[in-house]
Amino acid sequence: MNERRTSFRDIKSELERRIARRVWPPGAIMPGEEALAAEFGAARATVNRALQELARSGLIERKRKSGTRVALYPVREARLAIPLVRKEIEAKGARYAYSLLGREIVAAPDFLRARLDLPETARVLHLRCLHLADRAPFQYEERWISLDAVPDAADEPFDETGPNEWLVANAPFSRAEFVFRAARAGREEAALLQLVEGEAVFIGERMTWLADRPITFVRMVHPPSHRMVTEI
Amino acid sequence: MNERRTSFRDIKSELERRIARRVWPPGAIMPGEEALAAEFGAARATVNRALQELARSGLIERKRKSGTRVALYPVREARLAIPLVRKEIEAKGARYAYSLLGREIVAAPDFLRARLDLPETARVLHLRCLHLADRAPFQYEERWISLDAVPDAADEPFDETGPNEWLVANAPFSRAEFVFRAARAGREEAALLQLVEGEAVFIGERMTWLADRPITFVRMVHPPSHRMVTEI
């Protein structure tokens, strides 16, 4: 008997090593939970936990009937965290500041009606905001909120807190669509972000719905130093 | 008794409606599975499935002890699909083509050693490739593969199939890091992507490891028309 119990981490890294060395090549069926438990002198639950983590990382595929296989196409999805911009800035250890640049209630512009499938009569709250990290411009936010879906937004000044934080607490969504792209900064964006006109900016666009009802469209423009980072 | 059974979709959309109308505001505790099953005249398993989907979309939070709550911060993570570039192009209905621009075995350059934590003696395979959609440049790929981790790569010509497809089948990874950013196209990138020098390009960078062993670093450069899209 082992003095030290074999941990699920030990098992996980040994299994990773065998997959790396192609002891079990891509697509191969791996030994069952019971056989691995016997080999490692560990409880089945411990082996199960190791296999679960490997499956979550996409390295193996577990199927009830056909057993566990080494994945042919290992990892296909990353998780993309969608933090509040304030949290994103604070996580960098920087001081967050917010500034409201514009606020008006308008008829929904054509591009917005097309993107959110809004009726011709739709009225929206149009907001322009700047988010700063240690006094430097970090994100220029241009946002439209559907007043049909979120009538309370019309009463909010948004002069001290950004609309994202307010929406998160007041307008839940069930579906969101994201677009990320690169563009050259126009004159206004460049001035707001303290860039030379034409520099490359990183743009994130987000649309949200609750049960098929459009809530908001937002365009977030970042200076060329911006990095969107994620991992598997 | 109902003629038509209440489906989990009916229940899901009614629960979404109540959350939208703030019958249950953010943070509120919702009725239990049993109470909802009684109200909707449905099986508990049906209610459970509806709740599961709402939880997966981040709209509610289920905890064994304290019950089900409307989420305070509804959705915090999107899933980002990482397709092969060939699949990405084919999914648009375009014809895929691939061209190898350069292939050499070199000592790992400093920037790469720093990013992948490679030893001074590390040798890598450096590849430059172009991926086209309907004959138009879609992605310029510059890739480095660690020959310590993947010695077989040295024997591959990569003249007909891109390294991504080969790696997916031959070098599984357990961890990946992604960086997305915007930049202005340099002279070479601009020429390859048929852009004017200085246009904004969308860059994705990816590093992968298997069990702490660095495998590859790749920089994928796209023209300004590129959109990276995801949803929740």
Image (cartoon, coloured by chain):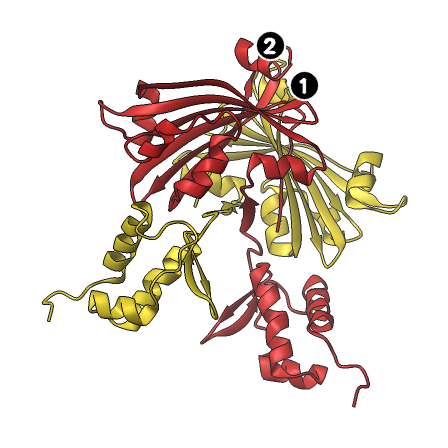
Chain colours: A red, B yellow
Q: Give above or below for A96 relative to B55.
A: above
The amino acid at mark 2 is: Glu
Q: Say which quarter of the image contains residue B106.
A: top right
Q: Nearer the viewer, residue B177 or A119?
A: A119
Left or right: residue B35 versus residue A10 is left
Quarter that holds the N terminus of chain A: bottom right
Element assignment for label 1: loop
Give me the disc on residue A197.
2
Q: Give above or below for A68 relative to A57.
A: below
In front: label 1 or label 2: 2
The amino acid at mark 1 is: Gly
Residue A91 spot, x, y in % from top left: 67, 40
Residue A226 spot, x, y in % from top left: 64, 29
Q: Residue at x 75, y 47 (%)?
A: B154
Q: Nearer the viewer, residue B90 or A129?
A: A129
Q: Residue at x 61, y 49 (%)?
A: B166
Give me the disc on residue B186.
1
